[in-house]
Image (cartoon, helix red, strand yellow):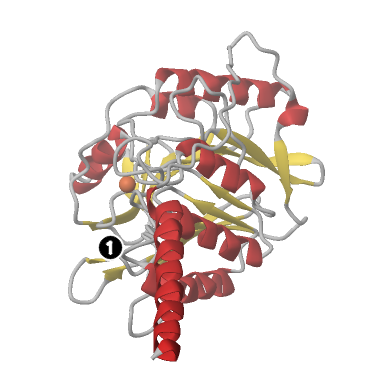
């Protein structure tokens, strides 16, 4: 009897300990708010620009430079954890197929308050490719409501900045959101492209401060580039109002809007507000603007000489059937050479990986 009692006490102790450990782990994984490092770094347009502060990525001479964009991967610790391996397989396939020199991510890499495991796992995948990568935040990355997630905006910045191959660099703290940064792709000591990563975060527009900061960078880089604006590409999450205008003009066969490749337009383009960023970008020699956010839309329309791209959504979760034949899931690749840009959408479906809809410009 004594022996049975002793065994029962031991079992009860083990079980109680396991429950306590499980509850503590659940708290720190799904409920605790990781605040991260709060850095006050206010920018003013009167600050002196220093080209040395701009990171560079090397382009090999006489070889194309491939940018693979992953849009709206949307991982969640609670609901998607058993799908992680499928998402990983898809990204592996996309990287293997396109052999990129740079991976960009246009926001909503995670999509809920439970983002800690997802973001750490995603960063570990990206580092495993040993290719530079550049993420921006979307409207879900640090919570369903502003900064409500387990990993706060600052903590997400900390994680991205620690990524071994990450180009992410926290921007000034007075632009409305933190994920704004710029880098140059350089060939033979000359700027080949300037990449502007902007954080459209929870806002419905690129803020006035972001536009001023963008202009300041473009003008600073111009001074270091023999007085010429370098060709720019801009990546952010939410589309500009000009996307809606471009699509309308394309639908009406107007001469200032030309589709490059197939056009999948299934969702309305509400949610973005007029703010003048498009005109600012155009005046600074930006030739490509790339957004995500609306999974039912995938197209490139050249509007007033700027290619506006709705990047293809990545990852099986929240994919969208455009019709019976086209599943909008995969990624968009930009093959950049000295005198042309080829844009290719790599479509992936659950049954079979396949490529569909390659197009050039
Ligand atoms: Fe979004």
Q: Is residue 5 visible?
A: yes
Instruction: Name the spot of residue 351 as percent of width and height, x first.
Output: 33, 85
Q: Which residue is mark 1?
A: 318
Place of residue 246 in the rendered image (x, y in percent of width and height, measured from the top left): 28, 40
Residue drawn at point x = 34 percent, y = 22 percent = 275
- Tell me where residue 15 appears, x and y as whole percent: 41, 74
Would residue 171 be found to the left or right of residue 151 on screen? right
Q: Position of residue 36 (x, y in %)?
A: 54, 37
State the residue lying farthest toward the front.
Answer: 2
Q: Give the SS element for disc 1.
A: loop
Residue 232 vertical placement versus 76 (above, below): above
Q: Left or right: 1 with respect to 183?
A: left
Residue at 49%, 55% (x, y): give it. Answer: 119
Judging depth in this view, the residue of 106 and 307 nearest the camera is 106
* Position of the N terminus by quadrant: bottom left
Residue 256 falls in which quadrant of the image?
Answer: top left
Can I make out residue 359 in this image? no
The residue shown at (20%, 42%) is: 248
Q: Is residue 92 above or below residue 162?
A: below
């Amino acid at each position: 009897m004594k022996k049975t009692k002793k065994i029962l006490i031991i079992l009860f102790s083990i079980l109680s300990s396991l429950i306590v450990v499980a509850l503590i782990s659940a708290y720190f994984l799904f409920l605790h708010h990781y605040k991260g490092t709060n850095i006050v770094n206010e920018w003013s347009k009167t600050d002196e620009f220093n080209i040395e502060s701009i990171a560079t990525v090397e382009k090999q001479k006489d070889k194309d430079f491939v940018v693979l964009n992953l849009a709206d991967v949307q991982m969640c610790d609670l609901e998607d954890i058993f799908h992680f391996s499928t998402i990983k397989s898809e990204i592996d396939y996309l990287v293997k197929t396109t052999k990129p020199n740079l991976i960009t991510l246009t926001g909503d890499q995670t999509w809920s308050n439970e983002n800690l495991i997802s973001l750490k796992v995603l960063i570990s995948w990206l580092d495993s490719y040993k290719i530079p990568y550049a993420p921006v935040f979307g409207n879900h990355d640090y919570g369903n409501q502003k900064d409500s997630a387990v990993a706060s905006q600052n903590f997400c910045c900390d994680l991205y900045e620690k990524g071994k191959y990450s180009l992410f660099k926290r921007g000034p703290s007075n632009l409305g959101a933190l994920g704004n940064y710029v880098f140059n792709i350089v060939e033979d000591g000359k700027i080949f492209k300037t990449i502007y990563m902007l954080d459209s975060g929870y806002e419905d527009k690129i803020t006035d401060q972001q536009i001023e900061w963008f202009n300041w960078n473009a003008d600073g880089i111009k001074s270091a580039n023999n007085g010429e604006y370098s060709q720019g590409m801009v990546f952010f999450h939410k589309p500009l109002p000009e996307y809606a205008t471009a699509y309308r003009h394309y639908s009406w066969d107007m001469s200032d809007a030309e589709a490059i490749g197939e056009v999948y337009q299934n969702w309305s383009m509400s949610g973005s507000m007029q703010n003048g960023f498009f005109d600012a970008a155009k005046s600074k020699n930006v030739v490509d603007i790339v957004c995500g956010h609306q999974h039912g839309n995938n197209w490139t329309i050249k509007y007033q000489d700027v290619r506006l791209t709705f990047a293809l959504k990545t990852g099986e979760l929240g994919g969208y059937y455009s019709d019976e034949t086209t599943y909008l899931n995969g990624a968009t690749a930009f093959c950049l050479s000295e005198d042309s840009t080829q844009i290719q959408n790599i479509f992936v479906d659950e049954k079979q990986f396949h490529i569909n809809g390659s197009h050039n410009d």
